[in-house]
Amino acid sequence: MKSLIRKSKITCLGVTLVFFVSFSCTSLLDQVPQGVISDSDLKTPDKVEQMINAAYSFLGQNHFNRQFSIPYEEGSVRGGEAYKGGAGTNDNGERDRWEQFVYMQPTAIGDLDDLWYVHYVAINRVHDAMRRLRDLTDAEYPLKSRRMAELRFIRAHIYYYMKVCFKYFPYIDEDTPQDMYDKVSNDELTDQQLWGKLIDDMRFAVANLPAVQPEVGRPNQFAAKAYLAKFLLFAAYEQDESHNINNINREKIQEVASLCDDIIKNSGKSLYPDFARNFLWEYENGQESIWAIQHSANNDGSPTGRLNSWLIYPVNADYGCCGFLQPSVNMMNKYKTVNGVPDFDNYNTGALLDNLEAITTTPIDPRLMHTAIIPGLPWKYEPTYIMQRSWVRQPEVYGTTMSQKMIVLPTCPSFRKTNPFMGSGLNWDVLRFDEVILWRAEALIQLGGSDNLNEA
């Protein structure tokens, strides 16, 4: 009897253990992971709106090694307008090679790879929002057409940057299967076909965006027209594979002139009476700004906000770091004038505009002082705050010029130190009214005729 009782107890215990283990495993496997939202939960109108906001948010991504918002190094540095700056050539050394156009390997792991990475992360956010948005009806989401136009505007903005950096790039849209991403080649579309993709997106934006947006930062119809004019102007200069212009498309040039004329007459935008206001935090989103990436200090609900221009401040006590993006002497010399007009033929002869004596005795375009500064001159329009040579991090390598446009005074409410770097909430104006005036002038010159040339 005792042995039977023991066996019975063991059997019952075994059944209990099996039941417990089975129940426990089933329960664990059926648990919904914390912090994970199901795909179906993201297809409601309010969640789609949040996904669209996430696409906007990435426009302000400005990590110092994964630059996205203000592309000065792959723009101004590669274009000869600025030196890399910083603590010598080995500081962010890959960008020194960008500056010199050496060892530019697209497969290298580093800054160039990061440049591709951040843009396709942004594109992925746009396409994720697009796919969710198109599954909603107009009745469910009355802003459907407008938001789709905003997303296509953002996509064209991102791909435009890839276009001017690389000319050819893998064009992925919202219908490209994910398992095909690494199979899309950068030579599937021609130069003109890629411009055509960007132009199509912006035509959709023009047709579906309102003339006025209720929220700052969202592009309106005139922003779309401005970007469309810019794309058409690039595309009008048709190139061969050696980048030689073999034709100027007159039809596109005519459309550029018409679009710019419409913006000038009907957008409500105008030039500031003081050029400096384009680069001051107090005047952002003002009368000359057509569309800007919205940056912030820490008044947006996040710990440090969405700062920009982390590395370009001087190395003095008020700022601290890091001395990148130093205007080149070649660029500064281009501001020399003769009888009030640029001296394009002889700008690099005679005095070099990298010292106080030359810059105060040579006739120059006054806009230089909004762009660059040298020791002895007032820093960012503050008469008593004079730049010193000691503020420059590596003068023996990169000289003593420093940038002015994208920085703010240390007393500006938008300035923040984030240890070890610093930045500000100053917006980046992607499209400005003065550019539109210049595009129209260029188009009119290409169209020719006495009336057009007189206006240009």
Image (cartoon, grey):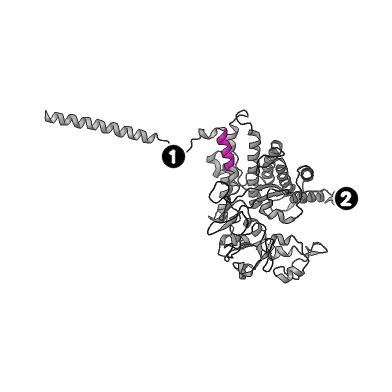
For mark 1, give the secondary structure. Answer: loop
Q: Nearer the viewer, residue 291 or 242?
A: 291
Extent of the magenta region: 45-54
Residue with the mark numbered 2: 450
Image quadrant assignment for residue 358: bottom right
Q: Work out whether residue 176 can be spotted.
A: no
Looking at the image, is 428 positioned above or below residue 3? Answer: below
For mark 2, give the secondary structure. Answer: helix
Residue at 55% over, 38% down: 177
Q: Work out whether residue 20 can be spotted.
A: yes
Q: Nearer the viewer, residue 72 or 284?
A: 284
Residue at 21% over, 30% down: 11
Nearer-N-terminus badge (2/1): 1
Q: Residue pushed farthest right? A: 450
Q: Residue pushed farthest left? A: 1
Q: Dot 1 surroundings within 10 Å: few (below 14), some, or many (20 or more)?
A: few
Instruction: Say if the magenta span includes residue 51.
Output: yes
Q: Nearer the viewer, residue 442 or 249?
A: 442
Tag 2–tag 1 contact (CB < 8 Å): no
Q: Is residue 34 left or right of residue 105?
A: left
Q: Is residue 381 left or right of residue 51?
A: right
Residue with the mark numbered 1: 34
Q: Is residue 10 left or right of residue 224?
A: left
Whole-percent x and y of residue 428? 65, 51
| Count of residue discs | 2
Whole-percent x and y of residue 193? 68, 43
Whole-percent x and y of residue 108? 54, 55
Whole-percent x and y of residue 310? 58, 57
> What amino acid is at disc 2?
Ser
Q: Which mark is residue 312?
A: none
Give the CA separation, mark 2 to mark 1.
Answer: 70 Å
